[in-house]
Structures are given as structure tokens and as C-alpha cells.
Image (cartoon, rainbow, N blue to C red):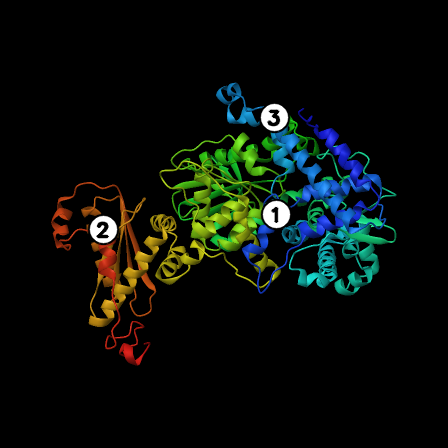
């Protein structure tokens, strides 16, 4: 006889009964310790992060569900044996897994031949089960320390109101949060030897907060500490979470994650506390309607724009990033308004900022509300970028900043990247973008990139040069349909390691969540000051090495559009091409050092740039530049390319003294027909032949490649 499958409500009721058992909180403490803690030896590595991926752990939302049900039943701290802790923990995991399966079964019913044949992708996934599952089980859209740090920035202009009405400002809140983290870390030092293997026992006391320690460590008053604990805590006596009847109902333990029972405070998950610090203050201020309408609401909107401006000007420079740009067709007719405009050569980022969060009712899978929230938060922002793009490309327009000053663009716009930026942590954002975002493209308009301030922060941290960031944005925009992951951190991590790239013989790639473990480890090293690698091993490190790294450094400081295209082309190249380029430079430099004459090499490049010619540096720079330009002109013509790049390498320093790019459509030219006879007769060699030609070995009596002029055996041998 087939066992009857239980529906979600029955399973949640059973889970509620389990959570109400005396002593279940000890099993809960075990699950929080097991799934919310990681350990490392020597330095943080991606392997240390892997435990947070896969099905062997409970998600934060699942742990919060258990916590909410415990609160609903009342905290019962009866001492129980380890066998019972094990039984309770395993039963809780089983029930949570069954809840997930029950939700999936509803979606599986959609997979009929009729639906697959007749429904569009949007229609197919516009179903409560699909939306509820994607939202509840979505990957985190931010790191906890980002919430902590950004809460200070987001509410810095509200500090006076917060101190007067709540009892602390967010700078003080950050200090208390750090002290709580120190407190909890101190509590688990006794388990260092366990190396992440947790036994079935109670860890309840390890989640207790020591108020005296918080006062001493934060150097804040007891009144400030108490104000913080009071607003971020709940108690079974005052709040029983009675309205929490479904996994996607409002759960008081999310905005108030600190539990108070008996005479102690406990914090089982620190992530929700950081998130609440970032999200809750705006709700506190809404209680003061006058302040909210006149001040707080404006501060909230300004945060997103100011944050993006500050981040992007670090990359593109203050003179190339603008805020609140109005586009005028005539003196009195405004035809567009850009929140943030970033320019690099002829490439521009049009960024429209929003602060629309996903509502509680939408989280429950209400299709119309999910779509309405998405439209207000992202579709409208995207539509605005298209209006602004069209306006920017009109003849005779005038750009003015917020002060009414005219902004002059240095180069003609050749590519537009529309970016929709939100200040909110929006669950299942990648999934919803794939289903609901309507966009268009043309020769200049790229597909959109929807991101949060949290992702922008990570992008700027790792892609710290204009070319790096622009290349990734270009790649991400144009792979919007073909490379898919649960969230953007996975895609960025893949890019840092292997380049975000899809081979021509493939049209789709789905990336696993655990790919983000490299990014997780590196970002924690950078932001938390932990030991470990600051950049994942892979292509990102390769771009910063040897001659190719020096060339990219030079291109970043020559923001000419054809040169930028060359840089973007390089960043799409394989490791083999990078190795070939570096070896070419080494061989040319070595030959020039040996015989004191000019050496050069040319090879083809895929993409907008037809090829590249490398010259070594001898004599007057202007003369060398003129000779290189002539050589590039002839080489471009001979290969019938649309563009060709030339570089001059200083064979003694290894740095590039000059770059040039000739770019225009190829047409027959009788004068150039005669000139190309001066080029070497052999055609450009294929890669394999060129690799053989470039091989060399430094002999004892050769001049040292370092450029000292001494023999190798007496210098760097």
C-alpha cells in the first residue's frame, strides 16, 4: 500500500509539535552550531566554505523557521540526553526536507506535455509553488559583514534621530555587533580541537550573550547596550509569534533574532542580526510619520545613488562618474534623467537606482504581487535606462548635473550598459529576472545587468580597474540568457577563476552554487582581515602578471575607445593567448638586448581587433611611434582587418612606452598596395609555428635579460 504523501500544512503542524517538545531547544542549538560555524587552519580556503553548500545542512531560513516555531510554543530548556538531542535534530531535518519536497511536488505537476508545449517560460514559472520555493530556498544575496558595514552608511544622516528615539546610532550598533561576534567566538574556543565535527549535545550556553563583556569590548555604556538588545530581541512573554502559521509568514525572529528567556539573552544566528540592522531602522522611523516623510525617505533614496557614485568613481575616476544627470532636448524640454552615469572612452553605464523590497505577501507566492514588486523595483528602472539611452544618442542634446552645470562627453558613445541597482537584498532576484524582465537590444544597447549594492561592492573590490569591471559587465550582460546560476556571486566567482565564457559549441551553462566558495573565502580574507588568499587562483591573477598585466595597466590609463576594445578583447582571450603574448615580449626584448636593434612580431587576434604588432623601443620615442603607426597601417591593410593595434615595449624596463590603434573599415588603397611590399614577405604565422619561433634559452655568455648589460653568468644566472 502506497504511503499517503502529507501536504505542507500537515508537515508544518508536525514540526510545530516537535519544536514544542521540552528540551527541543538543545537540538536546535546543535543544528545552529553545526550549520552556522566553520573552522580553518592556517588561512581561510574555499574548502572551508564548501560546508555551506549542498544538502547536508539547513539553510538560514530553515533554522529561522525552527526558531520561530520554538518561540510560538514557548522556550522550554529542560535538560535532555544526547540520544534525544540526536533524535530531535534528525526528525527536524526530515520534516524540513519533506516540506521542501511537498513544495516541489506542486511545481512538478506543471511538467506536463501540454504545459511544456504551449506555455512560455514566464507563464510556466508564474506559479505560486515555483515562486515560493525560489524565494524561501534562495541563496543569500549579501554577506553578513556587508549588512553590518552598510547599515552605518545607510543611516548616517539619521544618526541624530536614532540616538534620540532608539538609544543608539548605527555606528554604535556596529560596535555592539562586533562585540557580540567576539563574544560568540570566545564561547566556542573550547571546541577548536573538534575541527568542525559537532557531537550531539547542547550548545545552548555557547549562544548566550555576556552583557558585561559587551560593555567592556564595545566601550559603550550599559544603557546603549540595553537599548540595542531590547530592540533586536524578542521574549516568549511579550511576543509569542502566534501569526507564524506558514514558512513564508512574518516571523518575528527575523527582525528580532536575539532571544530573551530567563534572565539571559541568546543569539543563535548572527546573520539575521546583521540583516536586521540594515533593514529594520527604516521601519522604526516610519512610526514617526513627520520625520519619515520629510527626511528619512529622502535619505533612503539618496543612499543607493551616493553608494554607487562613491564605488564607481574609485574605478573610473571622479571626472568620469556623474550623478543626477538631466538630458535636455531644448532649454525647457527634459527628455531623460540618469541617476548615475559612468563613462570610459565611448562606453557608458546608465544606472537607475531603486529601493523597492519584496513584500511579505509576495514572498508567499502571490504571482500578481511578485510581478508588481518586480515591475516597481526593476522593470521600471530598466525602462528608464532605455529612455535615457535614446536621449543620449540624440543630436544637439545638453547634459546638466544636479547643480545645473553642463556636462560635456569627451567621446562619442559606442556602447551602453543599462544597470538596474537596488539597495535591498532581494531574494531569488536572478530567477525573477530570467522570468519577468522585458528588455531590448540594438547595436549600442546591451542587455541589462540587474544588481544590488552588495554585488556592486564585491565587483568593485575584485575588479578594481576600469577594464576589469567593464569587461565583466559586458560579459554578464551578453550572457544573460545563456549562463545561469542561483545568484550573482556564483557567476563572479566563476569569472575570477576561469573567465565567464561559453564556448561556441555550447548555448547554455548552469553553474553550481559551490563555485562561489572561492569568492566567499577571498572576500572574507579582504573584509574581515583573516589569513588566506585575497584573490582566487585563476584567470584574475593571470591578468595581473607579466607583460600582459603591464599592458592592461597601460590600457586602463589610455581611455581611447579603440584601445579599450583591444583591452576588452584581451580579457576574453584564453590563457594560451596570454602566454603567447608574454613569450613574444620576452623573446623580442631578449633579441634587442643581444644585438641592439629593433625587433617586432605580429599576430592575429579574434574579435573587433584584427591583430597586434609589438615593437621594441630604440631611439627617439616620437620617431618610434611614427614607425609603429606606419607598420600598423600597412599590417591592417595587408590582413584586410577593420582594426589593428601596435605597442612599443621598452626592452630594458619591460613597460609599454606607447600604444596605438588604427580603426576604420577596410577599403582598397593603391598607395598602401605599394607600401605593403615593404613588409616582410612571410605571412603572419599560425600560433603553433609562432610558439616554436619564440622559444629560446639564455646562455651563460648572453647579455642578461634584465637589461643590466652584463653577461648572464655574472648577473642573474
Query: In this rendering, would 7 be left or right of 653?
Result: right
Q: Tell me if residue 161 can be seen.
A: no
Contact (Cβ within 8 Å) of mark 3 with mark 2: no
Where does residue 519 sit, x and y in percent of width and height? Answer: 54, 52
Name the residue tied to disc 1. Answer: 142
Name the residue tied to disc 2. Answer: 686
Residue nearer the viewer, 460 or 397: 460
Q: Residue at x 33, y 69 (%)?
A: 653
Where does residue 438 sit, x and y in percent of width and height? Answer: 51, 30
Name the residue tied to disc 3. Answer: 127
Query: In this rendering, would 138 be left or right of 417?
Result: right
Separation of residues labelled 1 and 3 (CA atoms): 26 Å
Q: Residue at x 59, y 37 (%)?
A: 428
User: Quick one: label 1 or label 3, which is nearer the N terminus?
Assistant: 3
User: Quick one: label 1 or label 2, which is nearer the N terminus?
Assistant: 1
Is 627 situated above or below 366? Answer: below
Where does residue 43 sit, x and y in percent of width and height? Answer: 57, 63
Circle 1 SS class = loop
Circle 3 SS class = loop
Badge 2 crowding class, 10 Å Cα cut-off, few under 14, some 14 to 19, many 20 or more, is few
Is 51 situated above or below 697? Answer: above
Q: Nearer the viewer, mark 1 or mark 3?
A: 3
Circle 2 SS class = loop
Where residue 90 sits, quadrant-wise, is: top right
Q: Residue at x 59, y 31 (%)?
A: 375
Query: In this rendering, would 380 be left or right of 257?
Result: left
Is 627 situated above or below 88? Answer: below
Amino acid at each position: 500500500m502506497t504511503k499517503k504523501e502529507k501536504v505542507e500544512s500537515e508537515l508544518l503542524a508536525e514540526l510545530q509539535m516537535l519544536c514544542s517538545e521540552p528540551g527541543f531547544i538543545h537540538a536546535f542549538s546543535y543544528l545552529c552550531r553545526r550549520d552556522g560555524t566553520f573552522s580553518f587552519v592556517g588561512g581561510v580556503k574555499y574548502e572551508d566554505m564548501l560546508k555551506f553548500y549542498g544538502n547536508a545542512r539547513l539553510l538560514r531560513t530553515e533554522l529561522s523557521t525552527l526558531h520561530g516555531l520554538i518561540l510560538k510554543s514557548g522556550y522550554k530548556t529542560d535538560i535532555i540526553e544526547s540520544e534525544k538531542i540526536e533524535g530531535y535534530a534528525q526528525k527536524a531535518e526530515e520534516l524540513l526536507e519533506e516540506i521542501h519536497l511537498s513544495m516541489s511536488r506542486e511545481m512538478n505537476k506543471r511538467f506536463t506535455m501540454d504545459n511544456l508545449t504551449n506555455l512560455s517560460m514566464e507563464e510556466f514559472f508564474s506559479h505560486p509553488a515555483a515562486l515560493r520555493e525560489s524565494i524561501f530556498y534562495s541563496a543569500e544575496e549579501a554577506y553578513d559583514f556587508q549588512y553590518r558595514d552598510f547599515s552605518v552608511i545607510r543611516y548616517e544622516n539619521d544618526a541624530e534621530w536614532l540616538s534620540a528615539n532608539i538609544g543608539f546610532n548605527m555606528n554604535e550598533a556596529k560596535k555592539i555587533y562586533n562585540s557580540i561576534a567576539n563574544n560568540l567566538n570566545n564561547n566556542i574556543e573550547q571546541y577548536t580541537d573538534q575541527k568542525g565535527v559537532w557531537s550531539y549535545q547542547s550548545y545552548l550556553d555557547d549562544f548566550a550573550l555576556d552583557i558585561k563583556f559587551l560593555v567592556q569590548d564595545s566601550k559603550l555604556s550599559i544603557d546603549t547596550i540595553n537599548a540595542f538588545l531590547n530592540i533586536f530581541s524578542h521574549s516568549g512573554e511579550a511576543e509569542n509569534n502566534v501569526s507564524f502559521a506558514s514558512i513564508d509568514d512574518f516571523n518575528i525572529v527575523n527582525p528580532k533574532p536575539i532571544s530573551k528567556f530567563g534572565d539571559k539573552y541568546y543569539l543563535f544566528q548572527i546573520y539575521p542580526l546583521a540583516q536586521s540592522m540594515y533593514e529594520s531602522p527604516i521601519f522604526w522611523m516610519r512610526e514617526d510619520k513627520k520625520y519619515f516623510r520629510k527626511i528619512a525617505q529622502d535619505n533612503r533614496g539618496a543612499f543607493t545613488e551616493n553608494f554607487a557614485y562613491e564605488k564607481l568613481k574609485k574605478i573610473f575616476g571622479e571626472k568620469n562618474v556623474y550623478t543626477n544627470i538631466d538630458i535636455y532636448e531644448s532649454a525647457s524640454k527634459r527628455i531623460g534623467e540618469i541617476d548615475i552615469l559612468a563613462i570610459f572612452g565611448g562606453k557608458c553605464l546608465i544606472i537607475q537606482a531603486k529601493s523597492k523590497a519584496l513584500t511579505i505577501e509576495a514572498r508567499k507566492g502571490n504571482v500578481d504581487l511578485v510581478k508588481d514588486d518586480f515591475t516597481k523595483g526593476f522593470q521600471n528602472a530598466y525602462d528608464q535606462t532605455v529612455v535615457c539611452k535614446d536621449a543620449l544618442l540624440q543630436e544637439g542634446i545638453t547634459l546638466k548635473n544636479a547643480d545645473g552645470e553642463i556636462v560635456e562627453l569627451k567621446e562619442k558613445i559606442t556602447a551602453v550598459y543599462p544597470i538596474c541597482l537596488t539597495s535591498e537584498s532581494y531574494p531569488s532576484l536572478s530567477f525573477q529576472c530570467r522570468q519577468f524582465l522585458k528588455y531590448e537590444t540594438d547595436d549600442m544597447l546591451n542587455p541589462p545587468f540587474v544588481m544590488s549594492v552588495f554585488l556592486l561592492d564585491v565587483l568593485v573590490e575584485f575588479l578594481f580597474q576600469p577594464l576589469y569591471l567593464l569587461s565583466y559587465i559586458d560579459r554578464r550582460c551578453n550572457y544573460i540568457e545563456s549562463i545561469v546560476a542561483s545568484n550573482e556571486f556564483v557567476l563572479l566567482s566563476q569569472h575570477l577563476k576561469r573567465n565567464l565564457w561559453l564556448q561556441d559549441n555550447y548555448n547554455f551553462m548552469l553553474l553550481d552554487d559551490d563555485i562561489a566558495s572561492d569568492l566567499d573565502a577571498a572576500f572574507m580574507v579582504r573584509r574581515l582581515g583573516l589569513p588566506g588568499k585575497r584573490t582566487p587562483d585563476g584567470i584574475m591573477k593571470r591578468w595581473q602578471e607579466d607583460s600582459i598585466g603591464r599592458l592592461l595597466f597601460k590600457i586602463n590609463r589610455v581611455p581611447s575607445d579603440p584601445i579599450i576594445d583591444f583591452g576588452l578583447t584581451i580579457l576574453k582571450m584564453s590563457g594560451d593567448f596570454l602566454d603567447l603574448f608574454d613569450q613574444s615580449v620576452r623573446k623580442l626584448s631578449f633579441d634587442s638586448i643581444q644585438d641592439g636593434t629593433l625587433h617586432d612580431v605580429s599576430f592575429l587576434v579574434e574579435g573587433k581587433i584584427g591583430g597586434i604588432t609589438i615593437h621594441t623601443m630604440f631611439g627617439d620615442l616620437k620617431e618610434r611611434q611614427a614607425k609603429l603607426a606606419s607598420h600598423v597601417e600597412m599590417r591592417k591593410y595587408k590582413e584586410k582587418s577593420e582594426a589593428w593595434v601596435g605597442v612599443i615595449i621598452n626592452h630594458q624596463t619591460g613597460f609599454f612606452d606607447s600604444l596605438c590603434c588604427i580603426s576604420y573599415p577596410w577599403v582598397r588603397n593603391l598607395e598602401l598596395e605599394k607600401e605593403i611590399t615593404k613588409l616582410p614577405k612571410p605571412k603572419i604565422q599560425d600560433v603553433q609555428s609562432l610558439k616554436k619561433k619564440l622559444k629560446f634559452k639564455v646562455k651563460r655568455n648572453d647579455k642578461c635579460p634584465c637589461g643590466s648589460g652584463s653577461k648572464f653568468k655574472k648577473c642573474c644566472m
